[in-house]
Image (cartoon, rainbow, N blue to C red):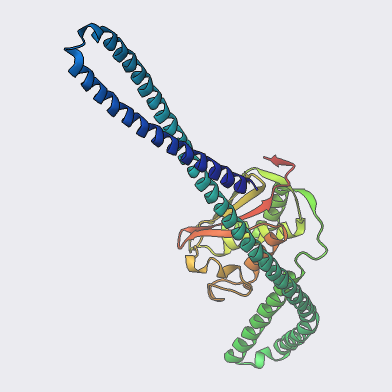
Amino acid sequence: MNLERCVEELKIIKEELAIENKEKIKRAAELVIANIELAFQNAEKAKRAAELMLANKELIFQNEEKGKRAAELIIANIELAYQSQEKAKRAAELIIANKEHSFESEQKEKCATELRIANTELAYQNKEKEKRAAELNIVNKELEQFAFIASHDLQQPLRTVSNYLRLLEEKYLSQLDEDARKYINSTNNAIKRMNLLINSLLIFSQLGNNRKLANVDLKIVLEEVIADHEILIKNSGALIEMSAMPALNIYETEMRQLFQNLITNAIKFQKVETQPKISISAEQKKDKWQFAVKDNGIGIEAIHYEKIFDIFQRLNSKAEYEGSGIGLANCKKIVQLHKGDIWLESKPKEGSTFYFTIPNLAVSATN
């Protein structure tokens, strides 16, 4: 409605301006004619001046009056021209204003279109997220079922094999040659690795089950984790430093597992004849806390940054470093349970820093 009213007013102004211009042209033409007649009369008067010397003073006076009126007319014309210029200026400003209004309308329509597209994309993304969440829920349930089977049905045959091997060693070890003993030893090691893998998978599948948020002092959690691994830390000569830690609403068991995995990995994946040095810190970042676990270990190539957080992914051979390949997958799952993110920065042969964030539900920070 505003745009239509503006257009109507513009049309009215243009029509009035056209009428005024026509009047001005008409008056200008009349003025030119009057000036021509005046010049002619002056010429005639000059011709008669010699004959009409006595009437000359009166004529001069009349000419002066006409000159005065002519000057007034010129001033009036100048004012009229100024007014015309002002009207033209206002008309030009109105045109510019209309163009700007039109541009703004186009921009608003463009923004509205972009918003509609964004909303459509967001709705699609939300549907995809819901779809993936449903698929992930199915996978998790299947994994839980598999873990249950693994923890019962798969471990029983392993125990049976292990028992028979133990009996074989007890009764017939003296009758076995060196190769047979190596075979038994290799089989026992394989059984241990299989048990480790099954137990690790069971832990992974059960992460977050029956969890309950509680306000926990992470300084105490870390001190307990370090105490639980006192022998490993002492044997490796590891030096562990810890900054002030916050008290957060977290899943305590899972958070304990997270720190345990990162600390033991920092000790395990260490360069030969190098003292492990581990630094654990926490920094508040607006609506979250960012934690860092830094080591001086073997480091990781950048191309593996994403891969190492996937389940069963190993970058080193089992002969070099023991493990199930599930530890960092557990870390990722624990951080995701807390609605956080986990990532790392690393340089091969220099060490790695694992970062993760936890929403800022802190009560205090402890020294």
Name the residue located 54 percent from the left edge and 43 percent from the top edge: 10
Residue at the image point whose x is 31% and y is 13% from the top: 62
Residue situated in front as seen by the camera: 274 or 263: 263
Percent x, y for residue 25?
A: 39, 36
Left or right? Give the position of 342 relative to 75: right
Q: Is residue 243 left or right of residue 60?
A: right
Q: Is residue 141 above or below residue 249?
A: below
For this orientation, the residue located farthest to the front is: 51
Comparing 32 with 13, the one in front is 32
Q: Does residue 278 show up?
A: no
Q: Which corner quadrant holds the C terminus?
A: top right
Q: Is residue 17 placed above or below 146 in the rendered structure?
A: above
Q: Residue 336 appears in which quarter of the rendering?
A: bottom right
In the image, 57 versus 309, the foreground residue is 57
- Residue at x 26%, y 7% (from the top left corner): 57
Where is residue 126, by image quadrant?
bottom right
Is 270 drawn above or below residue 223 in the view shown?
below
Horizontal side of residue 63 vs 233, given as left or right: left
Number of marks drawn: 0
> Residue 104 placed where, x, y %?
55, 49
Which residue is the extreme one toward the left? 50
